[in-house]
Amino acid sequence: MKVRIQVVIEAENGEPEKVEEIARLERGALHPEELGLTLAEAKVLLHGMQQAVVTEQIVEYLEKFKTCPDCGAHRTRKGRHPLVYRTLFGKFNLVSPRLYDCPCQNHGRHSSSPLAELLSSHCAPELLYLETRFASLMSYGLSVELLTEILPIAEEISSTSMRRHLQRVAERIEGELGEEQFQFIEGCPGDWAKQPPPGPPLTVGLDGGYVHASDQKSKSEGWFEVIAGKSVQTEGGAKVFAFVNKYDTKPKRRLYEVLKSQGLQMNQQVVFLSDGGDTVRDLQHYLSPESEHLLDWFHITMRLTVMRQMIKGMTAELKPDDKHPETAAVLADLERHLDSLKWNLWHGNVLHALQRISDLDDGLGMLEENPANRKKLEKAVREFQSYIEANQAFIPNYGDRYRHDETISTAFVESTVNYVVSKRFVKKQQMRWSQRGAHLLLQTRVQVLNDDLRKTFGRWFPGMRGEEPAALKEAA
């Protein structure tokens, strides 16, 4: 069996049809591997079709520039230069003519290149979209291998150009972000009361992760912090965001735009949970008048667990013939103080909790000997006291919230840090990052994870507003 595949082009100006053969296939006895098209044949076919279509589109586009739109006079050509344009289905070397303007335009001897002005980026939007999408989900090298395996672009894409294209997209996204503000609360209580009934409450969790810095002498030293967060709607739906803390100049605007995209109104309740660090605490202020700021229970109980393990370790080291038998009683008292401390914090009794911390500190001073980890425990107790004092305004009655099925922990953000930051930047990745490179990659990555990247490209290039192929989803 022989198959000839042709492209038939119908011109709109009445010219005869153009028929161009782009591929020939031959098949003999049927084998499973020869049923239908092979990947190699499909690449050749797509490249041939793309070549035919691109050639005719360029000819048709340049045709309307050959004459002056005002007087109809023929425009003389100054010269021509090659123009490389990369698409999903191959790289094409185009010829871009430079034409003189018509004398009736009164521009002197000015010239222009219509094709170069149209194709200024030299990379098709669809290819740019796929490069950005896959490079946001996996390493640049693997993204190049994947695209060259399935698309007829041969070895025309490199990891360097892919990184450059992704950063260009990220910079355009960043350029659309509004100016930073100290507060985003608009209007007055009277205006808020006139707004429509608000949507369900939003729960926002923030936490930090760390990425290897590229400006260090070795891989074992040098990290910088990345803040990641997740905004969850009560009735389902969530969006993530992330930024490099020391690089980003618009962190509060970034968070506000995420909330705004979820329909935030000034009369809508927003619950912020964080670990109590200064960075995330300052970030969440003055975004909504109905906001509630809570200290994450997970970070409290994590510190309590560490102190408990230290006390248990000191207890386990006691010997029957210990010269100071009262040490065991003091350690037992410390453990009871710790239980009381946790109980008071769980029920929001901050003043009683601070008293229990003082009891812990006093109890450590009563130890007549210096068991192992004593100094570490003293340091942990004093740091915990400072931590609770600094965040006492954000400690609610966790038990009451828990009984009413309200969020008390940022556990959902721990997983967010994992798949937004760690999975691409840390785990199994041998790269070290500059703050700028990590920040820009984070912006495209969250767009992909939020299913917003296709919408962004559709806004930039209206012809791409179609639905995203289902095969590309859930690749993260």
Image (spheres, rainbow, N blue to C red):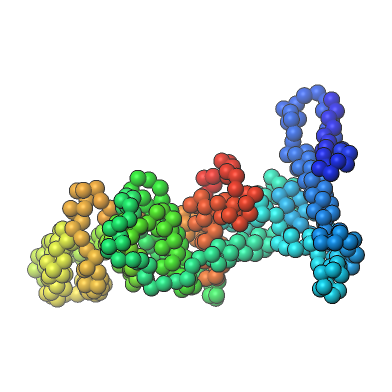
Q: Is residue 116 left or right of residue 14?
A: left
From this view, report whether residue 245 is shown above or below residue 158.
Answer: below
Could you say which quadrant of the image residue 144 lies in? Answer: bottom right
Q: Residue at x 52, y 55 (%)?
A: 447
Q: Which residue is drawn at 31% across and 62% down?
A: 191
Q: Can residue 54 be seen in this view?
A: yes
Q: Is residue 15 left or right of residue 273?
A: right
**Closer to the camera in the image, 314 or 51:** 51
The quarter in which the N terminus is drawn is: top right
Q: In this view, does 448 lie to the left or right of 58?
A: left
Residue 336 in percent (x, y) is at 12, 61
Q: Which residue is drawn at 54% across and 64% down?
A: 176
Residue 408 in percent (x, y) is at 26, 55
Q: Can residue 422 be seen in this view?
A: no
Residue 17 in percent (x, y) is at 86, 38
Residue 134 in percent (x, y) is at 60, 52
**Closer to the camera in the image, 314 or 360:** 360
